[in-house]
Amino acid sequence: MVIRPPSEADSILLQVTLGCSHGKCSFCGAYRGKRFSIKDEAQVFRDIEFARESFTEVRRLFLVDGDPLIIPQERLLRLLERVRERLPWVRRVGAYANAKALSRKSDDELLQLHAQGLGLVHMGVESGDNGVLSRMGKYGDAEFILEQGRRAIAAGMKLFVTVLLGLGGVSDSLPHARATGRLLSRLQPDCIGALSLMLIPGTPLHAEREAGRFRELTSSGLLWELRELLACVELEKGIFFSNHASNHLPLRVRLPKDKAAALERIDRALRGEEPLRSESARRL
Ligand code: SF4
């Protein structure tokens, strides 16, 4: 199964890596059991030829799996060049980019990638709270993640980020929400997607829950956290989504102008006056 952001549902998905080179986040089941590797270049070029035959109308292309930016620079530039040559109708190339992969590229290399067509990166921020980040096995602390995101923006790329409601559990819900909101305000990404934690059997965090060492938030706890987080986010211009299938209350909020209305909607949901997605309908 190939994983892509909801916003890339209609994009050409070009697989250039398998798995994620970090692979240590305790909540993440995305690539569990997949050994990280970079896909054979000749095969990727054949896949581009397939896309040339099959997707003549598709204007967006997304590189998968977990962190294509870990690919050595020269090879990544060749790949982007091939996309430009063979799929000239593609207007936007996006990729997942975790903070580790971004940190391995110099500022000049990020500029080169942008000049060669990489216009958008999706980065999993997950939390702005250092305690939560460290317990969850994320690579780097909040300042490191902030710096890497800013470097992508400075290179001219659009930055879409995800954060994970519930990642602090019951004990750290409030610090997680507030620190995450503050980090997002400093980062100023173009788009924020808030997902809700769903524990996946086989992950370390699931085992923590089973052992009674991690207490999950209830649906109302997740809504309180969503409210707190959104209240703390100050974007000059951007979009905040909570419409992922893991969430109870789907929102699409243009910031800053729709924030007050969105907070009122969450308040209505907390009073039971807004329909919520049922637990059984939630999914990753
Ligand atoms: S960096 Fe992303 S894909 Fe990799 S293990 Fe962490 S959450 Fe999963």
Image (tube, rainbow, N blue to C red):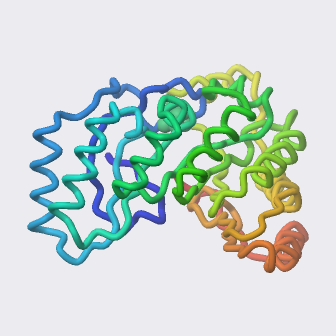
Hey, which quadrant is residue 16 in on the image?
A: top left
Q: Residue at x 79, y 79 (%)?
A: 258
**Percent from the top left, x then y, of residue 52?**
13, 65
Q: Is residue 256 left or right of residue 158?
A: right
Identify whether 202 is placed above or below 182.
Answer: above
Viewer-proximal residue among 243 and 73: 73
Identify whether 211 is placed above or below 188.
Answer: above
Q: Residue at x 77, y 68 (%)?
A: 236
Q: Is residue 214 left or right of residue 101?
A: right
Q: Is residue 210 left or right of residue 74?
A: right
Viewer-proximal residue among 227 and 127: 127
**Percent from the top left, x then y, of residue 47?**
14, 51
Q: Residue at x 39, y 48 (%)?
A: 113
Observer able to see residue 201 = no
**Percent from the top left, x then y, of residue 119?**
44, 59
Viewer-proximal residue among 224 and 274: 224
| Count of marks, rendered view | 0
Viewer-proximal residue among 128 and 69: 69
Q: Residue at x 39, y 66 (%)?
A: 9
Observer able to see residue 238 = yes
Q: Residue furthest front?
A: 108
